[in-house]
Amino acid sequence: MLGDAYFQLRAQVGTGLFSLLRLAAEAGSPESTQAALRAAQAGLRDYFTFAALGPGGSGKSTLLNTLFERDFCGAPEPAAVGKIAVFRYADQARDDVFSDDAIVLYRPHIFLRDFTPVEVPAGIPVEAVNPHLTEADLIFYVVSAATGPVDAWPFLSRLGRDVLKRLVFVVWQSDRVSSEEGANSVKRLRQAMLKNLGHASPIFIGSTADRAGREKLTRWIEGEVIFSAPRRGRLREIDEVARAALREIVNKPRAERQALERKREQVRGLREDLAEREEQSERQVAGALWTLAQSSDGLRRRGEDLLREHLGPLDLLWKRAFSPRDLAQEIEAQARASLAVQLHDQLAVLEADLQASTAEYFHELREVLPEAAAVKPPVFPRASLEEVLVALVTPLEVSRVLLEAFSAAVRTLQLPMFAAVGALAVALGAALAGRFSGVLLGLAGAIVVFVLLLAFLLRQNVVAVFGRYFTENRASLLGTLDPHLRSAVEHFYAGIAPTLEDRAGQLADEGQRHEPLLARLQQIEETFSRIDEDLRTGLSRTEES
Ligand SMILES: Nc1nc2c(ncn2[C@@H]2O[C@H](COP(=O)(O)OP(=O)(O)OP(=O)(O)O)[C@@H](O)[C@H]2O)c(=O)[nH]1
Ligand SMILES: [Mg+2]
């Protein structure tokens, strides 16, 4: 259909403008933007008036029917015979007598929404015709190829210059003559036109049977009249208005989205920062436990020294001389006191570091989220934690272990000691009986040395058993303290995190709010870019042809 590409493009612009206006209202754009869009919308509503004049029977009706691909004028409308027939669109067909010379025929043909064809029969005075030509976009003067422009000039020379500018000649019914004759009549027509009108209008030749000729005319109409440079220019202006409005509408939500994105980025940064601080605190807890382990090692060594001091190898031979209970109490008291001090110190350091770290973190938090100003940093429950941890420190029970190890050593020594005493008694008896035996004395001496050596080794073993027990006992104590300390730190950080998580959630929701609007804007933006592209390529296409 004539002008399809233009109408499609115009429809796209129309749809785009419609959506854009709705969005502008939704996004609360300034009234000036909305007014510009409405004006652009109004500017889109245009239609084309094509008038056909010429001698009777030259083919005016047939030409119009051919162009619009529908038999709407001529024979189907007997009421219009001898009158200027103006065809307009209406849902219901009706005729409107305009004057003695003219009739308006309202018909429900879709193409009449965009085109207003006017057929002017021969014999109507030029004064009556003129008003219908002033508005016309294109005026066909149809002459029959067989008869030529009979008496056209007196009428045509009375038309204004501006009307002549929109005039084209159509030499119709070319199938009724040879192509040579057709070409000749075009030539004659051009000469007569120049002579009579002093003006050169385009001349087309064609017929219902001449498809190529019709297409040539159609292409020319599309390029020069429908998709004419001024109309394309107008569409581009509308496209510009739309794109400017789009930029303006999009500015606000886009800027908000960017601000939101920055906020989110900051919140993400804070989250990472907090996680890092928590990890740092966990490392500190591990360090505190390591320090406690180190100091318990020192305590063990002190206990071992104390034990060596109080337990000589000979004490194992005469057990009443040694009291493991008193020694154990001393070790126990020292160990407890030292551990309590260490625990206190470690917790104090941990607390100070946590406070410093959270103060720093909350300072950053308030910069990013001023609304978090009211949120107070949590308090690390150092005192109550210390109480719990000290209560977990169970007695070492060194006295039991010492007593057991000591008794076992004494038991082990008993038999060799009796053997040594026996051997000494035998050697002594033999000497007293005057039968001094070097061998016997040597043997007794060897047994005594063995017993002393054994006593020394067994004393070492008692110290070793104590040391092992001490180490195991403290290791299990540290194993007990570890989860308590860790969970206290975890709990502390869990008290900070929600402020941030709440805000992150809110920001996510706020972000969602803009998405549909921005997605629609993007769609419209693409539509208008496409239109712009079409307008550009349309331009080059017609420039090429
Ligand atoms: N062979 C041939 N006949 C045509 C052609 N176009 C129109 N005719 C015939 O020419 C006659 C006149 O055609 P119309 O279209 O009615 O001409 P018109 O200028 O509208 O005539 P009026 O409205 O009476 O002035 C009709 O019999 C058509 O069938 C054509 O291209 N080739
Ligand atoms: Mg006619």
Image (cartoon, grey):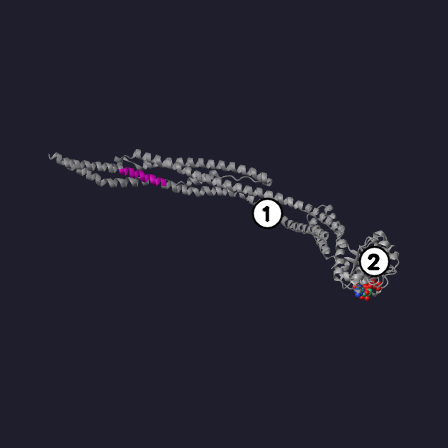
Q: Nearer the viewer, residue 507 or 416?
A: 507
In percent of the image, x 69 and y 45: which residue is there?
Answer: 248
Q: Is residue 74 visible to us here?
A: no
Q: Nearer the viewer, residue 170 or 466?
A: 170
Number of other residues with Cα within 10 Å of mark 1, as a class: few under 14, some 14 to 19, many 20 or more: some
Cα distance between the residues tagged 1 and 2 = 79 Å
- The circle on residue 519 is none
- Range shown magenta: 457-471
- Residue 418: name its quadrant: top left
Q: In this view, does 186 lie above or below 259?
A: below
Q: How many marks?
A: 2
In percent of the image, x 38 and y 37: which residue is there?
Answer: 296
31 drawn magenta: no
The residue that disc 1 covers is 508
- The percent coordinates of residue 335 (x first, y second) are 38, 36
The yes-or-no answer for disc 2 within 8 Å of ligand 1 is no
Query: Mark 2 belongs to which amino acid?
Result: Arg
SS at circle 1: helix
- The percent coordinates of residue 529 (x first, y second) are 68, 50
Most common SS among magenta residues: helix
SS at circle 2: helix
Q: Is residue 358 visible to us here?
A: yes
Query: Mark 1 belongs to which amino acid?
Result: Ala
Q: Which residue lies furthest to the left in this view?
A: 434
- Residue 498: name its quadrant: top right
The residue that disc 2 covers is 188
Q: Is residue 128 above or below residue 388?
A: below
